[in-house]
Amino acid sequence: MQGKNMPMATGKKIIWLTGVFLALLIVLGPVYMLVKYSVSDLSSINTGGEPIPLWPYHPTLRMYEFLFTDSQFYRVFMNSVIVSLFTVLLSLLLGVPAAYILGRYQIPGRKLLLLAIISVRMFPDIASVIPIVEFFIKLGLHQTYTGVVLAHTLLALPYVIFIGIGAFESIPHELEQQAWVMGAGKFQTFFKILFPLAIPGLAAAAIYTFLLSWDEFIFSYFLMFGRQEIFTLTLYLNGIKYAEPQNLLAAISVCLSVPVIVFSMMVQRYMVAGISTGSVK
Amino acid sequence: MNSQRNNHFLSETLVSTGVWIRKTWPLLPATFYLIGFLIIVFLYLATLSLSNPSAGINFPSLKVFSELAHDQAFVDALVNSLLFTIAGTPLELLTGLVFALMLYRNFFMRGIVRSIFLIPLAIPAIVTAMLIYILFDFPGGHVNHILSGSYPPFPQIISEPLNWRGSGLFALSISMLGKVWRDLPITMLILLSGLNTIDPELFDAAKTMGATMRVRIAKIVIPLILPSISAVVLLRSVEMWKEFIFPFVLAGRYRLLGTLIDFYYNNVGNSHKAAAVAMVLVGCILLSSFILFILMDLLQKVTNRR
């Protein structure tokens, strides 16, 4: 262990490089396998006792072709999109005004409120899911899109508020004061000055919420259990794991992961900041 | 006189509450939403776990918990969860530390390598679980082929393929493997942020004074990133207790507390027992966090004294 910029002896450099190479292998190996399985033909999976090839004998995109023309997959995919988009909408509708107040004003009880907001995420999902399902059964929201959207919003809202607070806090107070001096009301100042400036941060919050809802499993599983026609991608993938060939499972997994990987790279800065402060799981 | 004072106090409180609401009303929908759900969760958990009308147990009673204590499935799940947390937390800490130490140095394409190291976090947990499901398939999965020596230069370690999902130890081990792989970036980033706060000149000075790598890690790195290590231990142990997806996909009947909740609720149809297990899970998390907090605090004090 030495300073960040101190040159290393050749022997140590080789050890360090080998370590980095192995680490990259550990991280990328499984991702490669996922892609490899998704383009594998059946003879590269059912090898009759022979070792499974590290690259398929006859790589094919047949599984993807099948998925993109399969009406059932299309329905499940659209279910995921609908649930995720409505979760984003509701989370922003509730979260942005809250983030604005918490980010711009020093109101009494602010710290207590922030603690209450984050404590929602500290509670284990698997422990809170039973009460919520029971409550939704009473309201007639069990096995409905609305129920799932409401539950996902509950999970996403603390993140939207925390990311939103950061976005609103970073806007200089002078801008707001100048608008007031020039006669703009609170609403005008918010919609014409603060909101447009906070959009990059709020976009990150929206993407983060979309991803959270897109790959959420526990609430979707408990709330949709028994009604296949509203299943999201995560539930569909779990439901077919015993029946379908591995290349199809891998292709569905890739379809489920690609949006997450792409969007995660876009909001990496916010995720890293969230992890460093302990607010992201 | 007293009633006048009370009325005055009441009207003042109402006015100040009114002012607070007028100032902060945009905050209220989100606050009511979150706190409303929090109240519902606590209320329902308490009501469900402390009663079971269909079995003649009226609220409030601890009978559901006493029934649970005599249930072998619950005892097994509790022990499994405890072992999962005890083994998984240090494993996450260790792998995260190794990855963070690698990224600590400035090197060519460090940013790209860091982005690559973040990939597991971007892959949905259910996908990682499914991938492990495929790789550890029995009898013909990739891992069985590797361990059978089918891919030189890997040596042969097993003579017969292992049924990874057919034994409690293996099934929970591969579940832990998946969990550690997916959470690796979080642990790594927390520790890396701790490492970045250390003055690099400290290492250079220690090296100049002849301290070996082991001494530098033990006497400089570990004590100085102890707050980050404490954060990792606390946060990751909570995550280990809460784990659901990996054992759900990979471990089947070898349950943790999380998957036992699913079993009681969706398979047995007993929401009261499921709620009681949820309460036990919350209790375990609070107790283990408290113990770990005390231990880490003690460790920090001992290290500071040295």
Image (cartoon, coloured by chain):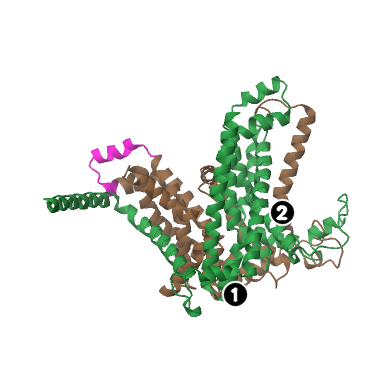
Residue A235 visible here = no
Circle 2 residue: A30
Determine if the magenta segment contains residue B267.
no
The magenta span reads A170-188
Kindly check if marks 2 and 1 are in contact, taking CB atoms under 8 A apart as contact: no
Say left or right for A115 vs A257: left
Q: Residues within 10 Å of mark 1 (few under 14, many from 20)?
A: few
Quadrant placement of the C terminus of chain B: top right
Name, please, the residue furthest toward the top.
B209
Determine if the magenta segment contains residue A178.
yes
* Percent of width and height locating residue A33: 73, 56
Q: Chain of mark 2?
A: A
- Tell me the tag on residue A190: none
* Percent of width and height locating residue A69: 63, 70
Q: Report which colour depicts chain B.
A: green
Circle 1 residue: B267
* Percent of width and height locating residue A159: 47, 51
**In the image, is residue A228 above or below residue A246?**
below
**In the image, is residue A10 above or below residue A250?**
above
In which quarter of the view is residue B298 placed?
top right
Residue A278 visible here = yes
> What amino acid does circle 1 point to?
Asn
In which quarter of the view is residue A16 placed?
top right
| The chain in brown | A
Q: Main secondary structure of the magenta part?
A: helix
Say left or right for A156 vs B73: left
Q: Chain of mark 1?
A: B
